[in-house]
Amino acid sequence: MSSAQQHFNVASLFQERARRRLSNYKYRVLVISGKGGVGKSFISSMLALALAERGRKVALFDADIYGSSAPLLLGVQGVRHYLDEEGDILPVEGPLGVKLVAVNLMLDTPDIPVVWRGPLVARAILELAARVKWGEGDYLIVDMPPGTGDVAITIAQLMPPETHAIVVTAPNALSEVVVSKAINFAKSTGLKLLGIVENMSYFKCPHCGRETSIMGKSSGELLASKYGVALLAKIPLAPEVNTAVDESTPYLLADKNGEVARIIRELAHTVIRLLEK
């Protein structure tokens, strides 16, 4: 047997095992974007917490190998993954019982860069998903890497049928291109699109209540209408989010009455309504 054939066989075994384990979650939601810098990891992490607040058993897979940030957003940056007696990787338990799997939790320090080429990262994601003892639950949220390359394709193809996607965008001149690529990626890989979340949509003055579109003109409604999908939420910019991140505190638990927290909880309610109907 050639080395190429051996490699294919091993990859197939990993894929089959990973798909079987991931299917133990009733609902799988991939949070995607056509580019970086739109707050995809924040949306993924806070959505996971908001679902857990509603009594759901949730796991969060931080699949952004190069820019893993879910551990910081959930306040578990100093924790590490361990192996059980069978050699399986155990998820880290975050706030509200959310199970977290992230490459950053396997490194000695979080500032060590992952200097791997695309095919190696895709193989690492495949093996990681297959070796994690995911257990069972209600929701698996996947914080996808930005773009539509090797790793994103590997993850999408890894998922069992009936896997959904949320597209995260921001109000700026690139929004239409970003959303187009992300939606077409979802369609081409068989994902079922739940809708669009427009992050950093506006800033509300804490003194006068006036809303200002700092990042550019909001286009969420137009884009949702153009592509025939739902606009799930418009999330504003808020200083409290940055404060929580700086303090390594999960924002949703630190600012329970804030406007961003309210909208994220409404987003979780919408996801539950759409998927559990």
Image (tube, rainbow, N blue to C red):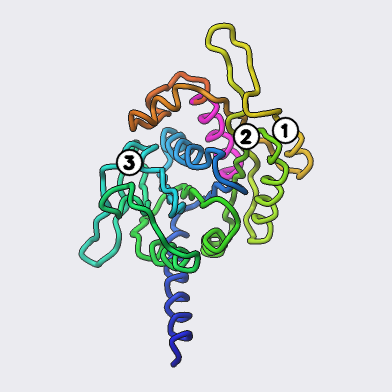
Which residue appears at 42% of the width and 33% of the height? 53
Which residue appears at 33% of the width and 59% of the height? 133
Where does the image place residue 184, in percent across and percent down from the top left?
Answer: 70, 54
Q: Is residue 271 within the magenta segment?
A: yes
Extent of the magenta region? 261-277
Q: Earlier in the sequence, mark 1 or mark 2?
A: 2
Magenta span: predominant SS is helix
Where does the image place residue 202, in percent across and percent down from the top left?
Answer: 62, 24
Q: Quadrant of the N terminus?
A: bottom left
Spatial distance from mark 1 to mark 2, Cα to Cα? 9 Å
Q: Earlier in the sequence, mark 3 or mark 1?
A: 3
Q: Is residue 203 above or below residue 250?
A: above
Spatial distance from mark 3 to mark 2, Cα to Cα? 26 Å
Q: What's under tag 3, amino acid-wise? A: Gly
Query: What kind of element bears circle 2?
Result: strand
Spatial distance from mark 3 to mark 1, Cα to Cα? 34 Å
Which residue appears at 47% of the width and 60% of the height? 23
Query: What kind of element bears circle 3?
Result: loop
Circle 3/circle 1 CB separation < 8 Å: no
Residue 94: numbered disc: 3
Q: Is residue 266 within the magenta segment?
A: yes
The residue at which mark 2 appears reads as 198
Q: What's under tag 1, amino acid-wise? A: Ser
Circle 1/circle 2 CB separation < 8 Å: yes
**Rendering quarter of residue 38:** top right
The residue at which mark 1 appears reads as 219
Circle 3/circle 2 CB separation < 8 Å: no
